[in-house]
Image: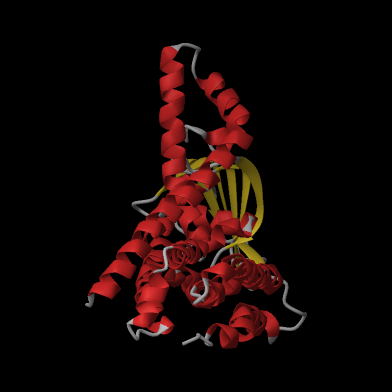
Amino acid sequence: MKILDRYVLRQFLKNYLIAFMVLVGMYVVLDLVFNFDEMIETQNRMTEGGGTSVALLLANIGRFYFFKTFLFFSQLAGIIPVLAAAFTMVRMSRFNEIVAILAAGVKLLRVAMPVIIAAVLLNGLLIVDQELIIPNIIPELVRGHDQLSGASGQSFEVRAMQDDRGALLFAGRYTTPSTTRPATIEQLDVIERHDEMPAAHLRADRAVFDAAAGAWMLQNGRIIRNLLPDQNPTPPLPATIYRSDITPREIALYRSGDTVPLLSTARINQLLERPKSYGAADLYRAKHMRFTQPVVNMILLLLAVPCMLTRQPVNVKTNAMRMLILIGACMATYFVCYHLAARPPSGPQWTNLWPAMMAWTPVVLFGARASVLRE
């Protein structure tokens, strides 16, 4: 590696770290400012006032935003290298370093090459974050500000959720898992079916999900079999366990698609293979957008570099405005396509095709412009 490459790379990595801390820090501060009252109220309900309460509040806030940082990074991974590259190029142009480099016979594209290569490698951090880290901390990421300590979960009713065997699950009250207790169901009813006809009825006063066993442990569970018209029902038999593909993650997906972007690609593919795929549109959107996001991130960088890598320092303001317009247009297109991807036209042929089209639209529209780099 030449001295010029090491110099440019060192400046870029330093600015990348600064941009990361500034953007993620602003994200955390703004989120904290707008939700601090809710956090205080939650903490006051759990503890009495005093120094211990303040220390516990700060500890819970630190834990809460530590995990959120990984999510914030995945959302900002595209703009961080853009700012780092812009700061690097502006600094070199301001101190006439670009003029000296050009006088030595080095092309502008050669100056930007270490930045581009480093950005490609740093995109790997996004892949690691999305595929390995975030899927393993989903319970921490889905906690609301009113669940600061993680001691309480949300509760709601589940009606007629179908598993892979066609059985229907009803939950009088389902409580999401937290850091201190597993997912629970109060008043569980499961109707097993054969050719759309009830074949058995499982009922339990309470069910607790055992993650190690991958099953629901029942309290006061009873099951009645042989409910088909030509059969004689059995008396209520004891039942202590209920095995099904209905897990806390499945229930979260059934209720809302907000958890889909947090899943790994392998898990998304598994969910798409189910006979009854809840939230298929959200799953396909997450799958295709997960693939194109690193590509869009590189397009953002390649749109920014030619604008800021200029031979004339006096044009920095004009070039910065042009960069903001290009970056803003690309990000706005990606944002619109992201939301349109979950709303395919009617017809089964569009279920997978439409999200794929929306995912690749920003690449097609801005890829050609990003590939034109000035010498």
Q: Quadrant of the N terminus?
A: bottom left
Residue shown at the point (32%, 82%) measured from the top left: 104
Residue shown at the point (40%, 61%) measured from the top left: 129
Observer able to see residue 155: yes
Residue 252's image quarter? bottom right
Residue shown at the point (40%, 77%) measured from the top left: 112
Please state the horizontal and vertical placement of residue 219, each as a whole percent of the image: 47, 39
Observer able to see residue 194: no
Residue 307's image quarter? bottom right
Residue 293 located left or right of residue 124:
right
Front-most of 269 and 369? 369
Residue shown at the point (62%, 60%) measured from the top left: 257
Please state the horizontal and vertical placement of residue 220, each as a whole percent of the image: 49, 39
Front-most of 355 and 99? 99
- 72 relative to 351, above or below: above
Report the residue that reaches farthest toward the right.
346
Residue 33 located left or right of residue 332:
left
Please state the horizontal and vertical placement of residue 286, each as a whole percent of the image: 56, 70
Residue 57 located left or right of residue 353:
left
Front-most of 313 and 83? 313
- 220 relative to 324, above or below: above
